[in-house]
Structure formats: C-alpha cells, structure tokens
Image (cartoon, rainbow, N blue to C red):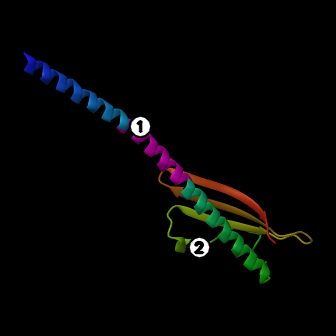
Amino acid sequence: MKRDKQKGFIFILVMMAITALAVVMFVLTSDSNTMIFQSDTAYLRATHRNLTSSALAWASYRINIAKTEGLNKPTELDISNLNTRGVSLSIRVIVEPGKKPQAVIDASCTRKRRTLTKRITCNIE
C-alpha cells in the first residue's frame, strides 16, 4: 500500500514539474517574440538612416559640383551594393533661386513581413 502511495506522489510531482515547465516556455516564447519584433524595428530604422544619409551625400555632391540639371525630377539611386533586399531609394532635389536647395527623399525598406516607408524633406547645406 505504501508503495502505491509513493508512485502516486511521484506522478503528481512529475505532472507539476511538466506544468511549471510549460508555463516557463510560454513566457519565454512571448518574450522572444517581443525581442524579435524590436530587433526588426531597430534594423529597419538603421537601414532607413543609412539610406537617408546616402541620399543626402549624393545630393550634396551633385550640388557642389554644380550639376543641377535634372535634379528637379525624381531619381532612383542604385543601392545594390548595400546587399539588402526589399530596399528602394528615390531622391528629388529642389533648387530654387535665392533659397537653399531641398532634398525630398523617399526611402522604403522591408524585413520579413514589415515595411518601413518614409518621405523626408531636408535642407542641403
């Protein structure tokens, strides 16, 4: 009789351990999903900053070498050397007499199912 009680007690102990392990796994899974979401967001923001910086450098170079023809229309920049998929970059430089040139940058980047698309207008010094 005592042997049967011990088996039952051990069975209950094992079931409680499995339940506790399931709860821990559930909590860790939700936390890891949050971390993945945050890392994807950080990647998209960093890629967008890099695209914006590249576009501003290109526009500044074009203005400094006095090649302003064709700048008022949108220009797709070649970003194939960045080795990123799902990225596009378009820039339009607005040059008006007596005013500082402005750059209108359309950048889009994708990671998994998320896409970050922004339009930024900057003054070029």
Q: How many marks?
A: 2
User: Is residue 110 or residue 49 the one in the foreground?
Assistant: 49
**Label at residue 97:** none
At a point 66% along the width and 55% down the height, the residue shown is 118
Residue 40: percent from the left, percent from the top? 52, 53
User: Is residue 47 or residue 6 the one in the foreground?
Assistant: 6
At a point 50% along the width and 56% down the height, the residue shown is 111
**Label at residue 27:** 1
At a point 57% along the width and 71% down the height, the residue shown is 79
Q: As shown in the figure, which amino acid type bears the numbered disc 2?
A: Asp
Measured Cα–Cα span from mark 1 to mark 2? 44 Å
Majority secondary structure of the magenta segment? helix
Residue 67 sits in quarter: bottom right
**Tag 2's secondary structure?**
loop
Q: As shown in the figure, which amino acid type bears the numbered disc 1?
A: Val
- Residue 36 is left or right of residue 102, and the answer is left
User: Is residue 67 or residue 38 the one in the foreground?
Assistant: 38
Tell me the quarter of the image containing the N terminus.
top left
Q: Tag 2: Cα neighbours inside 10 Å, few (<14), some, or many (≥20)?
A: few
Q: Residue at label 2?
A: 78
